[in-house]
Image: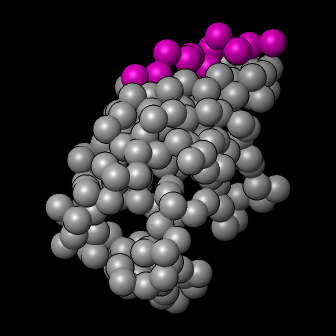
Amino acid sequence: MKIKTQLPIFTGFYNTIFDIPEDIEDIESIDYKKYENDVSNQLCEIVENELSNFIKDIEFIKVDSPKYYNYSNDTIDCIITPKKQAILSYIKQNYNNWCKYLKDNYTSYDGFISYYSNDPNSEDWNKNLFDEHQITGVLDFIAKNEDITTEDLYCELEVYAEDYRL
């Protein structure tokens, strides 16, 4: 089963550790598109490796950047082939942490309306667990629960912004 979704763990380029550092001279003369595509390709490989117990394959599609960064950041669109049984077993073994993750990440509050339930017994997280959005949430949960961070991904990157000068 292949699922078109967004790469888990990745928090975007704009104002994150993946953004091109301001101290690079002639920042206007950087090929941002190529840099972001190369970083995204490598991040797909790194996440696939980090979560290899739960993912068979990740295929990079494209970087999706919002027109304005007021409400969202960049995402990496990809196709993930999950190891369904391993994921289901992991959730079962880490059920209390899973419940906490859902409450922390899917509870609406002032300025945030969740489109998904924060109840682990809801249809969102049972019947639809392997849908487009949910698989990203599940894999993000596993990564957080296993202390795999954006900083870990960044440290494994072998793409350097200064190499993308025009």
**Residue under the image location 66 percent in, 50 percent down:** 4
Q: What colour scheme does the image use? A: one colour
Residue 121: x percent and y percent? 36, 83
Please indicate, yes or no, whether residue 147 appears anywhere in the rendered image.
yes
At 55% from the left edge and 17% from the top edge, which residue is drawn? 159
Magenta region: which residues? 156-166
Q: Position of residue 94 (x, y in %)?
A: 19, 63
Q: Nearer the viewer, residue 44 or 39?
A: 44
- In the rendered structure, the answer to whether residue 6 lies left or right of residue 136 reads right
Examine the image and state in which quarter residue 63 appears.
Answer: top right
Where is residue 43? Give x, y as percent.
Answer: 52, 31
Number of marks present in the image shown: 0
- Please state which of residues 93 and 12 is positioned toward the viewer in this rendering: 93
Decide if residue 50 is on the left or right side of residue 90: right
Q: Is residue 25 above or below residue 149?
A: above
Please say if 32 is above or below 161. below
Residue 165 lies in the magenta-colored region: yes
Residue displayed at 40% across by 23% down: 156
Looking at the image, residue 18 sits to the left or right of residue 70; the answer is left
Magenta-colored stretch includes residue 84: no
Q: Which residue appears at 65% of the width and 61% of the height? A: 72
Is 127 or 66 nearer to us in this picture? 127
- Residue 166 position in % (x across, y down): 81, 12
Q: Quadrant of residue 98?
A: bottom left
Q: Image height check: is 18 above or below 26?
A: below
**Pick the front one: 34 or 4:** 4
Q: Is residue 76 visible?
A: no
